[in-house]
Amino acid sequence: MQTIQSDKRLEVSSIQKEVLATLSYFSVFDYPVTIEELNNYLSHEVQPKDLSSLIKANLIQQSDNKYYNLSNYSINLEDRITGNKRAEKLKDRAIRRASFIGSFPFVRSVCLSGSMSKGYMGQDADLDFFIITKSGRLWVARTLLILYKKVFLLNSRKYFCVNYFLDTKNLEIEEKNRFTATEVVTLINVYGRTEFESFSASNSWAFAIFPKAKIKYFNGGKRTELPKKMIEWLLNGRMGNKMDSFFMRISLNRWKKKYGHMVNADFEIAFKTRTYVSKHHPNNFQQKVLDRFESRYNAVQQKIKSA
């Protein structure tokens, strides 16, 4: 006689499934979230009873009556709280640095990105900045910023990590996934509000993934524009065109020489190099996060079924 196997998987609602996906993602960073933070990444607000049933089923866990995390993954709550406090202490410095970056030639918009844009700074974390430049001058702007870092900051990235640039005519992020969507909707604009709003509109796909996300701003204050305008005037013609092409070429050649061991597909993602975009992520962090997220969420999906 054939034995009928009962399906012991937990039946979950669509909002509970979103909760599990979100907590799977943040578990990659060992980062427990509050219900308020969780709701920022959901299509609508989750109810306490929905979370309670997931806790009872041992799919998620609650810490300190406030923070939620995927079950079976240890968390260091003190690390999160300390990191939040550190981010708050560094906020004014980050805003000043972003405003300073905005004073460089051909820079049109500057945003806080990375962990700082999420209100957290690990002990060894960098201050990351996302930068939009004038079209046709991205590599001039980038090179000037890198030279400043090398000469005046002794090449320290600690509070000056400029690793992602786009230009004003190519504002849409090409890779569309949970990682890039999270980074887009958590950016905090400090300089160049108009260009940032154009960027957000060009990446409406990210806000479709996280419909409750709001565009965020910090006031960077006033800055001196005269030196910037003079340099831009000097480099507005053919010489500027040649310099931009030259800087892109030598940067790409240097990266290929240093990271030539990488698989070509991984290199293209980690070191995206075009006239209109520059991304410098040597550790290919995006792919590592996505791989870990997929592994963890797939494990969760084996335990649930949709209502």
Image (cartoon, rainbow, N blue to C red):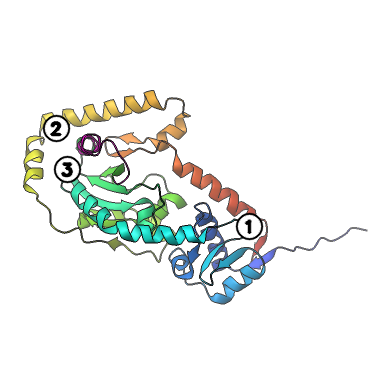
Q: What label sits on residue 24 in the rendered view?
A: none
Dividing the image into 4 quarters, which one contains the C terminus?
bottom right
Disc 1 marks a residue whose amino acid type is Asn
**Viewed as shown, does residue 60 lie left or right of 226?**
right
Q: x, y (%) of residue 253?
A: 32, 24
Tell us which disc is closer to us: 2 or 1. 1
Q: Picture quarter containing residue 86?
A: bottom left
Marks 3 and 1, how far apart at CA:
48 Å
Instruction: Give the mark nearest the N terminus, 3 or 1.
Output: 1
**Secondary element at image label 3:** loop
Please name the residue that numbered disc 1 is placed on. Answer: 72
* Residue at figure coordinates x 10%, y 36% from the top left: 236
Marks 3 and 2, how far apart at CA:
11 Å
Disc 3 marks a residue whose amino acid type is Phe
Q: What label sits on residue 106 in the rendered view?
A: 3
Marks 2 and 1, how far apart at CA:
55 Å
**Secondary element at image label 1:** loop
Q: Is residue 204 something one can see in this rendering?
A: no
Residue situated in front as seen by the camera: 142 or 200 = 142
Position of residue 21 relative to residue 67, above or below, is: above
Please name the residue that numbered disc 2 is placed on. Answer: 240
* Region of the chain picked out in magenta, as a range: 141-159
Q: x, y (%) of residue 66?
A: 51, 70
